[in-house]
Image: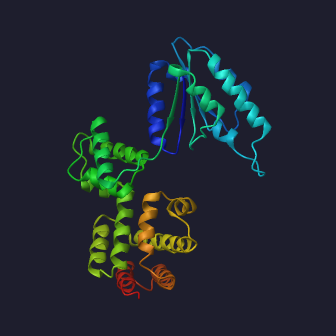
Amino acid sequence: MIYLFHGEEEFGKSERIAALRARLGDLAEMNAVTLDGRTLSRDAFLHHVDVPPFLGDFRLVVVEGLLTRLEKKNPDGRQSEAAKAFLAWLADYLPTMPETTLLVLTENKKISARNPVLKAVQRLGERGEVRLFETPKLKRGELASWVADHARKKGIPLASGVAESLALFIGPNLRVIDSELEKLALYAGDRPITQKDLRLLCPYAKEASIFDMVDALGGRRTSAAFRLLAQMRRQGAHPLYLLTMIVRQYRILIQVKDYMSQGMRLQEIASALHLHPYPTEKAMRQARGYAPDQLEHIYDRLLETDVAIKTGRLDANLALDMLIVALARVS
């Protein structure tokens, strides 16, 4: 059986591959291998794919990034002759592959519909599967339902509002949500995961609070900003950590504001900043509330606060309080 999994959504692919590995049972360690397609040769490919399984019925071979590498264009915009030859050879070979091998070609980007290997797998009928994994375009309520359903399938109980909070804090990054659920479940044991657990263990909750505080400052809602600051202090956040997070958020806003002025769109900005589109979209919304000179003034004020704390000129908590007042008055 031959599988071609492509697209940027990694969580769905990893779950599907894990399910295939589970089919091997206790023999998975001896009958499963993962190969780096970025450097894989034909001989090395054949060496692993043509080997019969040891004691079991199947052998699982996962090849990562091979088709992405072979589709890559040269500086002149053309595909190399060697890459074309490799693709043609692979397309011809796949129908002859041993039926005892489960081959997974997994790619972190969408593969062209014209790719000869993709077409070859499609022609295999029941012996082949091509599946595109894309990040789901879920609204917040739909994502919260996905979180609740996923937790239920994993046997992880959630207290009221936890699914909604995870959806809000993390956005549609299913792998991160799954990882956070596992971590929280380990901490909570048999009891349901609570909002308190989330605030204690989930770094995204703290980042979300910083987002909310910057929102409050941008809206000149000083009291709301102070409430959020007090909440983070009660959760044990160190003043220098809070200052670092505030600086990080305003640095992102400055960069986002600059990229927006160049006409860049959401996905382009997210890629340039190495951020997920979800927090990038929120930053774009926040950046629209500031003029460039306001952000420059704020960044100067942040630097002054950092120096005042680190030189001992001001108590750290007092310096943060003064900073919140100053940022809320920026005009």
Residue at position x 59%, y 40% from top? 111
For the N terminus, give its image quadrant.
top right
Residue at position x 52%, y 45% from top? 8
Q: Position of residue 183 (x, y in %)?
A: 36, 45
Q: How is the image coloured?
A: rainbow
Total marks drawn? 0
Rendered image quadrant of residue 234: bottom left
Q: Is residue 320 depicted above or below 93 in this figure?
A: below
Q: Residue furthest top?
A: 55
One can see residue 152 in this view: yes
Q: Nearer the viewer, residue 209 or 281?
A: 281
Left or right of 164 in this view: 316:
right
Q: Is residue 279 depicted above or below 157 in this figure?
A: below
Q: Position of residue 326 (x, y in %)?
A: 38, 86
For the C terminus, give its image quadrant.
bottom left
Q: Position of residue 107 (x, y in %)?
A: 58, 39
Q: Nearer the viewer, residue 269 or 176?
A: 269
One can see residue 245 in this view: no
Q: Is residue 114 depicted above or below 269 in this figure?
A: above
Left or right of 40 in this view: 150:
left
Left or right of 234 in this view: 138:
right
Q: Is residue 124 depicted above or below 41 in this figure?
A: above
Residue at position x 63%, y 30% from top? 117
Q: Position of residue 84 (x, y in %)?
A: 74, 35
